[in-house]
Image (tube, rainbow, N blue to C red):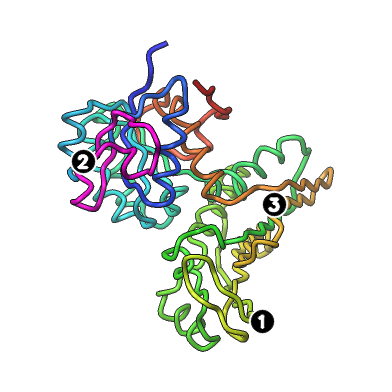
Amino acid sequence: MKKIRVLQFGLGNMGSMMAKIMLEKKDLELVGAVVRNEEDKGKDLSQILKLKQKTGVKAYSSLREAIKATKPDIMLHAAVSYVPKVWEQIKPAVEASVNVITIAEEMGYPFKKYPGICKQMDATAKKHNVSILGSGINPGFAMDLLPAIISGICQSVDSIKVTRYIDFSPFGPSIQKNIGIGLSIREFKEGIKSKKLPLHIGLPESTYMLAHALQWKLDKVYETRDPVIAKKSFTVKDYKKVEKGQVAGFNHCSFGLYKGKIKIILEELGRVDPKFEYKNIIQIKGDPDITEWMNVPSGHITTTSHAVNLIPKVVEAQPGLRCMLDLLPAPVLSLK
């Protein structure tokens, strides 16, 4: 079997993890990486990823240069969260007939919020015979695809609630800043009001994806965001000290209304606490009622693995802008 040639765009926490995973996969060949820091240009990835042995894989500061030099089949994108910036960054790859998987949260199901940009992405991808997919653990699996699949053993479904518990302590400072760690309650509320504090990006996208799977044309989707306050002072590794009374986490919910009734509730309970148990609980009310409980570990493990395992499915997918509902399941890829 011919190895799939993969270009990695972005070597932050998530991108670095994906690069390391790909280096261990039998059917994938990591051929290059696009980096933001000019000083990393030309380096072997072993220097950037702090690996003991050289990889023979080079870093580039220009996407076009990287594509020309490496001729990838697909690019994994891990750099930004919002659709307009994603499209700006991945467009040169799509126009060069390179498939794209992005872990940008808004790309999990961008069709409702960005119909115009989605039409551009879809048309460009089809013109160049490639596919674009946005997916991670959430959106893309835990709170949308998985409950949709489980609903397939029901005769009918009245409502679905998914609760996800996450420890954010392994994530980097940029993510912890986005969720308000160390802010006062006033600062947290001001950040929510000004939209400078996104918390979890992607809950509405997961809500719309799940509704689409169930053929529910939602009347309305709305969100609530509440801070969780530290009961004692503690230090976040590699970030900052959080004082008693400051923000140490959040409760973020998305509600989907169909025919005036709340049919979908997605709630993410995020904390910066290594003792916080990872859980993903899916509750389906219908015929029959179903409750599924599983531990879904941190996104820096699961999002990265999921994106890598999706590579063959996206290369084989029909051209255009896709979501996870369009693809067959992607089992784990074999190690070397």
Q: What kind of element bears circle 3?
A: strand
Image x and y of residue 199, in percent: 50, 67
For label 3, count other residues whose C-alpha is less than 10 Å away and answer few (under 14), some (14-19) or many (20+). many
Which of the two marks, 3 or 1, is nearer to us in this view? 1
Mark pair 2, 3: CA separation: 38 Å
159 sits left or right of 238 in the view: right
Mark pair 3, 1: CA separation: 27 Å
| Picture mark count | 3
> What residue does disc 1 label?
232
Tell me the magenta residue range: 33-59
Image x and y of residue 62, in percent: 17, 43
Please name whichever residue, 114 or 187, is drawn nearer the observer in this view of the structure. Answer: 187
Q: Residue at x 37, y 43 (%)?
A: 49
Give the residue at the far bottom of this rendering. 186
262 sits left or right of 224 in the view: right
The disc labelled 2 sits on which kind of residue? Answer: Tyr
Residue 39 in magenta stretch? yes
Q: Residue at x 35, y 43 (%)?
A: 77
> What residue does disc 3 label?
280
Q: Looking at the image, tell me whether mark 3 or mark 1 is earlier in sequence order.
A: 1
Image x and y of residue 238, in percent: 47, 65
Q: What kind of element bears circle 2?
A: strand
Give the residue at the far front of this rendering. 52
Please name whichever residue, 324 or 67, is drawn nearer the observer in this view of the structure. Answer: 67
Q: Up-down: is 288 above or below 243? A: above
148 sits left or right of 315 in the view: right
For label 2, count other residues whose C-alpha is less than 10 Å away and answer few (under 14), some (14-19) or many (20+). many
> What residue does disc 2 label?
60
Q: Looking at the image, tell me whether mark 2 or mark 1 is earlier in sequence order.
A: 2
**Are the two marked residues, 2 and 3, in contact with CB atoms closer than 8 angstroms?**
no
